[in-house]
Image (cartoon, rainbow, N blue to C red):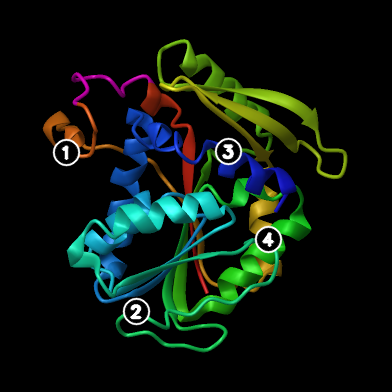
Amino acid sequence: MSHFSKTQYNSISASYDSVNDLPISRAIVVNVERLIRPHIRGARVLELACGTGFFTRHILDWGAASVVGVDVSQAMVDIAEADTAKHVEYAGKYRFMVADCSAPFSASDEGTEGGGGGGGGGFDLVFAAWLLNYAQDQATMGTMFRNIANHLNPGGRFISVLPHPEDDPMVCISQVNAQRKLGYGYGIEVRKALPEIKDGYYVHLFFDTVPPVDFGNYYLPKNVHETAARQGGMKGALTWEPVSLPDDYDEINRYMKDPVPRGYFDRWLQYPDFGILVIEK
């Protein structure tokens, strides 16, 4: 993972949860729950790029037997541990560790209930929100997928949130910037094209939060993800899942920090800023 990932997240860790509080970020939770629910009951879960534990706690609420959260930032992990420890119902079911997911590493759920131990495998599900967009090239993303495959049990699956998949990510970038003018919360500045990846970009994201948050990552074409997954050992069914929201805004607002008015997501749903990739081992 590019060096900026560790340093930038150590510096913004205290304010990062304001990004999780944006309505479009909470819309991610709706979609992740829909896809995870059928597979989560009693599952051992490895969460990559866990950040401050926002999804870790949801995964435990949804019925996971245990979760190991991994992040490159010690500051993020410190917050995740402190915030998750406030919930006595999670005791013994989680553990956090610092590791770079773009380099080989091993994680086990030793120390959590039902833990497997060992240096690989043992997890029924690997989940990652905003991990793959920290790969600057196909080889780096392939290593991420190798880590995922090595930690999954046979028949396990990987579910990932990532930028809206496009053959040319500039389409996604342009759409997000247009939506920012409608008040949906962030914009993207292209810093440079990546010479080794056709239609790949190093970008910087600027969130309209209080306090403002910004950070850099990479937007790579859809086919790079698919090829890297196969190179990394994920050989099963690969699907790009559609993003959707319930028609009932009472149901939608169950996920929001603050209620949003009926119709709030109508324009956003014409082009959701994220996609969801599901791959079986």
Which region of the structure is painted magenta?
259-267
Q: How packed is label 2: few (under 14 Cα within 10 Å), some, or many (20 or more)? A: some
Quickly name the residue at label 4. Answer: 102
Question: Which tag, 1 or 3, sits closer to the chain's start?
Answer: 3
Mark 3: amino acid: Ser
Mark 4: amino acid: Ser
Mark number displayed over residue 254: 1
- Spot occupied by residue 57 in the image (x, y as percentages of width and height): 30, 56
C-alpha gap between disc 2 and disc 1 = 30 Å
Q: Residue furthest top?
A: 181
C-alpha gap between disc 2 and disc 3 = 30 Å
C-alpha gap between disc 1 and disc 3 = 31 Å
Whether residue 137 is visible here, answered yes or no, is yes
Question: Which tag, 4 or 2, sits closer to the chain's start?
Answer: 4
Whether residue 234 is visible here, answered yes or no, is no
Question: Which tag, 2 or 3, sits closer to the chain's start?
Answer: 3
The image quadrant where one finds the N terminus is bottom right
Q: SS at mark 2?
A: loop
Query: Which marked residue is nearer to the observer: mark 2 or mark 3?
Result: 3
